Image: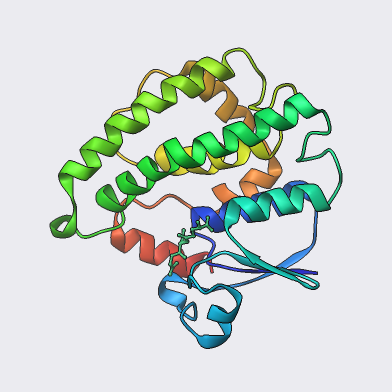
Amino acid sequence: MITVWGRRNSVNVQKVLWALEELDVPYTRENVGGSFGSNQDADYLAMNPMGLVPVIRDGDVTMFESNAIVRYLAARFRAGVLRPAEHRSLAMAEQWMEWAQVNFAPAVSTLFVNRVRSLPEHRDVAAAAAAEKKAAEVLVVADAWIARHDWFAGQDFSFGDIVMGASLWRYTGVDCIRPPMPHLMEWFEAVQQREAFRRAVMAVPRAKDLADWKRIEKETA
Ligand SMILES: N[C@@H](CCC(=O)N[C@@H](CS)C(=O)NCC(=O)O)C(=O)O
């Protein structure tokens, strides 16, 4: 049985839970981080010296870094389900996971922190505006790719869809100007039909402000 340490409202934890659900691998989860704390305890720091979530334990493997965990799980369980067997599809899964993590996820995080998860007086308005612009620019790139493919790796769903899907769920819950992205929205509709996405990501409602965020964190523990 795999153990996941991390609160359910963390996008990085959600990526790992989504992968586990897609792979139908049994797991247990411990609430760590945010209002639950424990992530600076010595025994937690022994697993992840960064003091961040998620961490997983799979037998004699204990690891952190959400994307590395997703790729590890994809390689370890149910070959071909999340990790494409065909080398060109695998290359595209790797490429788009990396691309989404480097280009889109940081913009979403800045937007989210400064428009939702902070008190209005603590918000960096300029940083949020820059992130809004950056997100809009890069989404046009993703939209152009997905206009020509069913999924980011090609014909089948893969780990290449996971960072984009989890980040887009958060992004579409933030009050901001979004670019036209009809193909990406079509892909996102298909993502939202996946049971695994519903259980791991959509099951945590999107917050409108800090108080809402704290309430949801407790309620979805
Ligand atoms: N690169 C790391 C980043 C992990 C990270 O930043 N986790 C955040 C939550 S999304 C965290 O642990 N924050 C402290 C907390 O939850 O208390 C990963 O992808 O796993």
Number of numbered labels in the structure image? 0
Residue at the bottom extreme, as displayed: 42
Task: Residue at 49%, 81% (x, y): give it.
Answer: 38
Tell me if I can see residue 156 in this picture: no
Residue at the left extreme, as displayed: 121
- The vertical placement of 203 against 52, above or below, is above
Task: Residue at 61%, 76% (x, y): give it.
Answer: 47
Task: Residue at 59%, 55% (x, y): give it.
Answer: 66
Question: The C terminus lies in which quarter of the figure?
Answer: bottom right
- Quarter occupied by residue 163: top right
- The vertical placement of 152 against 24, above or below, is above
Name the spot of residue 147 as percent of width and height, x first.
57, 14
Question: The N terminus lies in which quarter of the figure?
Answer: bottom right
Task: Residue at 45%, 78% (x, y): give it.
Answer: 37
Compare residues 87 and 181 and report the one nearer the observer. 87
Compare residues 63 and 123 and report the one nearer the observer. 63
Name the spot of residue 80 as percent of width and height, x first.
84, 38
**Is 150 left, or right, of 189 in this rendering?**
right
**Is 73 left, or right, of 133 in this rendering?**
right
- Quarter occupied by residue 94: top right
Name the spot of residue 169 as percent of width and height, x first.
48, 41
